Image (cartoon, rainbow, N blue to C red):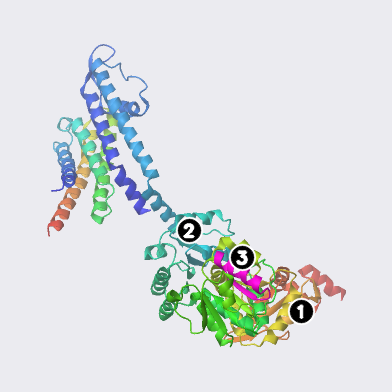
């Protein structure tokens, strides 16, 4: 067992599970989507991205790409939240929550791909 | 470049993760710890405000507490996270600085820059492997002629010397082992503009490896190799190495020419001399008596073979005949540095002496002892170290054999002026009177420096006025080409040595020879003559003047005016 692989896999899966946790719930209901959950998703995704740095293989490049996509979506979601609450002061209206959650949904898709790639890599290693 | 990016990313992983963690924990803590606003109500920082505060706190130690003054709990948390953040940043910067100074990183960067520079080369260049004495002399000679070179050497000090030597062209240099294929490829072995590979390292095996690599990866490339032994020479020749230069055989060949045709040897010295060097005096190696050869190594063997073909009796002086092998002629055991051995070899009756050991001090000692015993003796001395140039010159030998200079001169002629090389090979078939006449003609062109060599072809493009003139049915002879475009009665100080015309070679073409499209000319003369000749071949007006002697008006208006006046 390689401890580096454990940490790597842990963060990639955690990024997906947290993302899912934030995503589930009614899309327009602000009570179903907590800000700390979004914070945790962003931080864990950042960590997962940094962990993927410096891998020269094709799989490594693809993994990094999916992480970058997820980060793009999540940062967009965080920005929407910040703008709505602090800049415009409109608060979390149904439309705002819907766009935040759908952005995080996109990020989740990227995270799903990331996990699938991880599984494929593992399966190919076993063969 | 890829390597470098990955290297940076990989090294920056731990510091980036540390920073991320410190920031995340600090932000999280700030949002969780309750504070009080201006009215005393309980207030919790939002994630956005916490991120903003941590961002400037970590890098600048803060601008104050916003949006409200902090509670003591918040202050405690901020002071903890402040120190953590500063440490994380120091760690990150330290890693970056260490990376920039890291040797692997710097080498990867230098190699990348070198490879990029080579990829961008558009003009033909020669790849010179080995930047010792020979390589230095060769690269200097090539750049003086405006040709490009790329250098590989295994010694880092030598490659950094390239930048210090004030060469006329920029010469990219790679520090690396030329026996490694990757280095040769990076240096442009398979580059479209690569004109040839020159293997000059002092290791025969490495030269062999370079030659094989070059012939396998780029079969059309011209490969020139230095070889010090006949085995390696035969090996190199077996897979089609274009030119193999053995300094000892080359010099022995020169000596044979000097015996048979002193004028031809002088002509060779003059035409192939380094640009700007002085005209050398003729040498007449005597044949009336026996020769003493001190040192029966590679050089001594080559000289002896030549002397015997000339029918000259040779006495060999060798200190360790068991190492070098026993010569089949008369020999004396000894170093030759002391009078006894030289006397035993018959120095007083000897016509010539070759001081050919691989130790410069011994060679000088041999010459000085021999001169005391027989001041008339003809002396050939072998110079091994470039640094000993002054003392070797001071001893005043009749001929000096310096392996590095011989290799460099031969390869320089081959690469910079290939037609001259061919001319000299053709000249070997002429008799000595032919050469003597040519020598006296050349002597009339120049004062005290060797003549300039110019290769030029009648082709379209830049300065192709003569080409267009000939292509339209014009007749232009060599005599006309050699007229001064400023005063056509005067003759330019230049000689056409050779013309390449398809498969024909015209050696010393006469003045009536008519030029044809596609001709390649080899000329020698002084530089001013070539500058003037350039006017004739690249300006239609000048060409007409040289041809007809009439200074015809050029512009449309002037032509009209002169037409009316007639």
Answer with the quarter of the image where residue A70 lies.
top left
* Residue designated by label 3: B392
Please report whichever mark, 3 or 1, sits nearer to the chain's N-terminal start: 3
Marks 2 & 3, CB-CB < 8 Å contact: no
Q: Position of residue B243 (x, y in %)?
A: 49, 77
The nearer-to-camera label among 3 and 1 is: 3
Please report whichever mark, 2 or 3, sits nearer to the chain's N-terminal start: 2
Please check whether the numbered discs 2 and 3 fall on a single chain. Answer: yes
Chain of the residue under label 3? B
Q: Which of B136 and B281 is in front in this view?
A: B281
Extreme-top residue of the structure:
B39
Q: Give the range drawn in magenta.
A: B360-382
Q: Where is residue B390 in the image (x, y as percent from the top left)?
A: 62, 61
Answer with the quarter of the image where residue B433 lies.
bottom right
Tell me which residue sits at (38%, 74%) in the image. B216
Q: Give above or below for B75 relative to A69.
A: above
Q: Where is residue A32 in the image (x, y as percent from the top left)?
A: 15, 32
């Amino acid at each position: 067992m390689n401890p580096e692989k454990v940490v790597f896999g842990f963060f990639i899966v955690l990024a997906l599970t947290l993302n899912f946790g934030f995503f589930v719930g009614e899309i327009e209901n602000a009570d179903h989507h907590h800000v700390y959950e979004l914070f945790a998703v962003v931080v864990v995704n950042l960590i997962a991205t940094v962990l993927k740095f410096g891998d020269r293989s094709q799989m490594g490049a693809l993994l990094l790409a999916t992480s970058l996509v997820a980060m793009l979506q999540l940062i967009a979601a965080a920005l929407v939240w910040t703008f709505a609450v602090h800049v415009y002061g409109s608060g979390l209206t149904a439309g705002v929550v819907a766009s935040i959650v759908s952005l995080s949904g996109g990020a989740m898709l990227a995270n799903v791909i990331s996990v699938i790639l991880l599984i494929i890599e593992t399966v190919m290693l076993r063969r | 470049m890829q390597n470098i990016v990955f290297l940076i990313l990989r090294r920056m992983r731990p510091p980036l993760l540390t920073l991320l963690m410190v920031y995340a924990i600090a932000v999280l803590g700030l949002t969780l710890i309750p504070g009080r606003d201006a009215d005393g109500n309980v207030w919790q920082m939002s994630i956005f405000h916490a991120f903003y505060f941590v961002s400037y706190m970590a890098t600048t130690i803060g601008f104050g507490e916003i949006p409200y003054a902090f509670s003591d709990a918040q202050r405690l948390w901020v002071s903890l996270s402040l120190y953590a953040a500063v440490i994380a940043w120091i760690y990150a910067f330290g890693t970056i600085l260490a990376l920039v100074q890291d040797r692997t990183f710097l080498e990867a960067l230098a190699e990348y820059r070198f490879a990029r520079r080579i990829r961008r080369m558009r003009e033909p260049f020669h790849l010179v492997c080995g930047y010792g004495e020979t390589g230095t002399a060769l690269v200097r000679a090539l750049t003086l002629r405006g040709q490009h070179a790329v250098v590989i050497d295994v010694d880092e000090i030598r490659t950094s010397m390239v930048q210090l030597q004030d060469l006329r062209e920029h010469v990219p240099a790679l520090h690396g082992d030329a026996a490694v294929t990757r280095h040769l490829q990076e240096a442009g072995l398979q580059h479209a503009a690569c004109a040839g590979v020159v293997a000059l390292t002092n290791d025969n095996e490495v030269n062999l490896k370079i030659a094989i690599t070059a012939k396998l990866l780029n079969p059309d490339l011209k490969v020139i190799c230095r070889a010090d032994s006949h085995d390696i020479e035969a090996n190199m020749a077996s897979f089609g190495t274009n030119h193999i230069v053995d300094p000892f055989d080359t010099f022995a060949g020169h000596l044979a020419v000097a015996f048979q045709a002193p004028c031809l040897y002088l002509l060779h010295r003059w035409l192939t001399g380094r640009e700007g060097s002085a005209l050398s005096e003729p040498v007449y190696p005597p044949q009336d008596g026996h020769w003493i050869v001190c040192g029966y190594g590679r050089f001594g063997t080559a000289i002896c073979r030549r002397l015997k073909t000339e029918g000259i009796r040779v006495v060999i002086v060798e200190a360790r005949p068991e190492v070098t092998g026993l010569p089949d002629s008369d020999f004396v055991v000894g170093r030759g540095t002391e009078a006894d051995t030289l006397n035993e070899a018959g120095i007083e009756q000897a016509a010539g002496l070759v001081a050919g050991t691989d130790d410069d001090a011994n060679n000088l000692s041999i010459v000085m002892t021999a001169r005391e015993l027989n001041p008339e003796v003809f002396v050939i001395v072998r110079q091994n170290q470039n640094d000993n140039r002054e003392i070797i010159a001071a001893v005043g030998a009749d001929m000096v054999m310096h392996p590095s200079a011989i290799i460099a001169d031969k390869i320089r002629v081959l690469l910079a002026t290939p037609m001259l090389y061919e001319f000299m090979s053709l000249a070997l078939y002429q008799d000595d009177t032919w050469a003597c006449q040519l020598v006296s003609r050349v002597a009339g062109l120049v004062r005290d420096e060797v003549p300039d060599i110019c290769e030029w072809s009648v082709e379209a493009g830049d300065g192709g006025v003569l080409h267009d003139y000939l292509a339209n049915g014009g007749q232009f002879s060599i005599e006309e080409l050699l007229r001064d475009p400023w005063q056509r009665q005067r003759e330019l100080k230049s000689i056409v040595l050779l013309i390449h015309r398809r498969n024909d070679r015209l050696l010393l073409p006469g003045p009536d020879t008519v030029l044809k499209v596609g001709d390649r000319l080899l000329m020698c003369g002084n530089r001013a003559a070539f500058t003037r000749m350039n006017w004739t071949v690249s300006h239609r007006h000048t060409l007409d003047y040289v041809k007809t002697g009439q200074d015809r008006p050029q512009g449309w208006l002037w032509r009209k005016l002169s037409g009316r006046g007639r």
